[in-house]
């Protein structure tokens, strides 16, 4: 038998002690709040990045082929669509992660 404590057994013991004392688990911490803000900023950055990349490609093609502003408009709309798609994928990822976490006791 090793001298190192078993983390699972320690957690189970802590839960039993809390239950016996009638102590509820702690409320969400500030880190939880910041993780939601980080997710929101990530989604905003994904949207803006899609728009800027689409705009840049369209503007570059307009300069090359002298078709101003048609390519810029088309690729900006494509960049917008790509940004929305990536944002939706991020939201689905966050939702799956939230569903996988056990509910907190309040």
Image (tube, grey):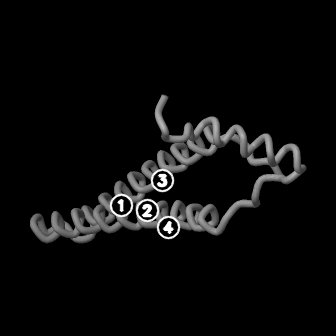
CA neighbours of label 4 inside 10 A, class few (<14), some (14 to 19), many (20+):
few
Tags 2 and 3 in contact by the CB under 8 Å rule? yes
Secondary structure at numbered mark 4: helix
Tags 2 and 4 in contact by the CB under 8 Å rule? no
Secondary structure at numbered mark 1: helix
Query: Residue at horizontal 24%, vertical 64%?
Result: 58
Q: Earlier in the sequence, mark 2 or mark 4?
A: 4
Q: Alpha carbon of mark 2 to alpha carbon of mark 3: how far?
A: 7 Å
Residue tagged 4: 41
Q: Earlier in the sequence, mark 3 or mark 4?
A: 4
Horizontal and vertical percent position of residue 52: 32, 68
CA neighbours of label 1 inside 10 A, class few (<14), some (14 to 19), many (20+):
many
Residue tagged 3: 87
Which one is closest to the eye, mark 1 or mark 3?
3
25 and 80: which is toward the camera:
25
Which one is closest to the eye, mark 4 or mark 1?
4
CA neighbours of label 3 inside 10 A, class few (<14), some (14 to 19), many (20+):
some
Residue tagged 1: 50
Tags 4 and 1 in contact by the CB under 8 Å rule? no
Query: Residue at horizontal 62%, vertical 61%?
Result: 32
Horizontal and vertical percent position of residue 73: 33, 64
Tag count in the figure?
Answer: 4
50 and 15: which is toward the camera:
15
Which one is closest to the eye, mark 3 or mark 4?
4
Horizontal and vertical percent position of residue 25: 77, 53
Horizontal and vertical percent position of residue 30: 64, 69
Q: Alpha carbon of mark 4 to alpha carbon of mark 1: how far?
A: 14 Å
Q: Earlier in the sequence, mark 4 or mark 1?
A: 4
Q: Is residue 36 left or right of residue 15?
A: left
Tags 1 and 2 in contact by the CB under 8 Å rule? yes
Residue tagged 2: 47
Tags 1 and 3 in contact by the CB under 8 Å rule? no
């Amino acid at each position: 038998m090793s001298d190192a404590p078993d983390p699972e057994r320690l957690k189970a013991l802590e839960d039993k002690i809390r239950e016996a004392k009638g102590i509820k688990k702690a409320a969400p911490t500030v880190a939880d709040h910041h993780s939601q803000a980080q997710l929101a900023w990530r989604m905003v950055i994904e949207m803006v990045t899609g728009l800027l990349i689409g705009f840049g490609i369209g503007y570059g093609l307009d300069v090359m082929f002298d078709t101003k502003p048609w390519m810029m408009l088309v690729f900006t709309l494509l960049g917008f669509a790509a940004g929305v798609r990536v944002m939706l994928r991020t939201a689905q990822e966050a939702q799956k992660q939230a569903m996988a976490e056990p509910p907190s006791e309040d």
